[in-house]
Image: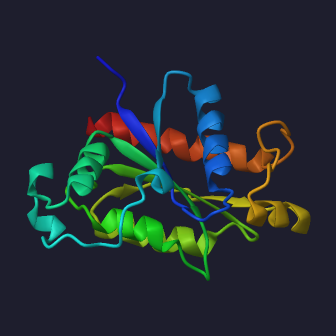
Amino acid sequence: MSTPSIGIIVCSQRVPRAGLQITNFVLNTIQKAYPTANLRLIDLATWDLPMYNEPGIPSLINSSDGYTHELIRKWSEEIASHAGFIFVTPQYNWGYPASIKNAIDYLFHEWTGKPGMIVSYGGHGGGKAAQQLFQVLQGLRMQPVEPLVALVFPTKEFTGKAARGEDLGVMEDASIWRDGREQILSAFQVLAQLVARST
C-alpha cells in the first residue's frame, strides 16, 4: 500500500520571492525526520492560475469534469490526488496572499475533510495570516492542524534578503529557525496522524 501523498503549497507568487526556498526548507526538515513521508511540492507560481473565472459554484461541482476551463480541471485533479496539505505562506498587510485564496476558492470538495497544516513566515512570523488561513480551512470543512508554525525572520538583514529573493542560508545554517524546525515537526506529527485516520 502506497504512502498517502501530502501536498506542500508555495503560497507566494511574488517575483522575486523567498517563498520557494522557505517551502523547500520546510519540506527538507520534514523529509529528514520522516524519510518515508510522501511530500509533493505544489508551486502556485508554476500553476499561474488566473483570477477566479469559473461560472460554476465549486460546492456544487463533484468532479473535475464539472469545471469549464482545462487548467482548472487539472488543478482539481492535482488537489484531489493529495490526502493532506501544508500551506507555506507569507503575510501581506496582516493577511495571506491573494494567490492562495484564489487557488483555494476554485475548488471545494477536493479540499473538504482533508488535514491542513499552516507554516507562516515574516518579520514577526506571519501569525495574522496563519490565523486567517486557519479560518478559511475551517470554512472548507478541512481539518486545520494546531499548532500553527511561525518562522520569524531573525534580523533586518535577513528580512532584506528575503524581500530581494536572495539565498537565506536556511539549508546550511542549522542555527536559523532551530525552534521553527521543532515546531514544524510537532505540527507535522499531528498532520500525519490525521492523514492516517482519514485514509
For the residue pair 111 and 68, the one nearer the viewer reads as 68
* In the image, residue 177 above or below residue 60: above
Q: Is residue 110 visible?
A: no
Asked if one can make out residue 6 in the rendered structure from this viewpoint, the answer is: yes
| Quadrant of residue 199 within the rendered picture | top left
The image position of residue 160, as x and y in percent, is 83, 66
Total residue callouts: 0
Kindly identify the residue that appears in the image at 87 percent across and 43 percent down.
Answer: 175
At a point 56% along the width and 59% down the height, the residue shown is: 148
The quarter of the rendered structure image containing the N terminus is top left
Residue 156 figure quarter? bottom right
Seen from the viewer's position, the closer of residues 42 and 26 is: 42
Is residue 77 toward the left or the right of residue 18 in the image?
left
On screen, residue 199 versus residue 104, left or right, reads left
Give the residue at the far bottom of this rendering.
93
Left or right side of 121 for 7: left
Q: Quadrant of residue 170?
A: top right
Query: Residue shown at 59%/75% (left/top)?
Result: 128
Relative image position of residue 37 (x, y in whole percent) = 48, 28
Is residue 184 depicted above or below 132 in this figure?
A: above
Percent of width and height locating residue 174: 83, 38
**32 sits left or right of 64 in the view:** right
Residue 18, placed above or below residue 156: above
Give me the residue at 27% from left, 62% from top.
141
Q: Position of residue 27 (x, y in %)?
A: 59, 38
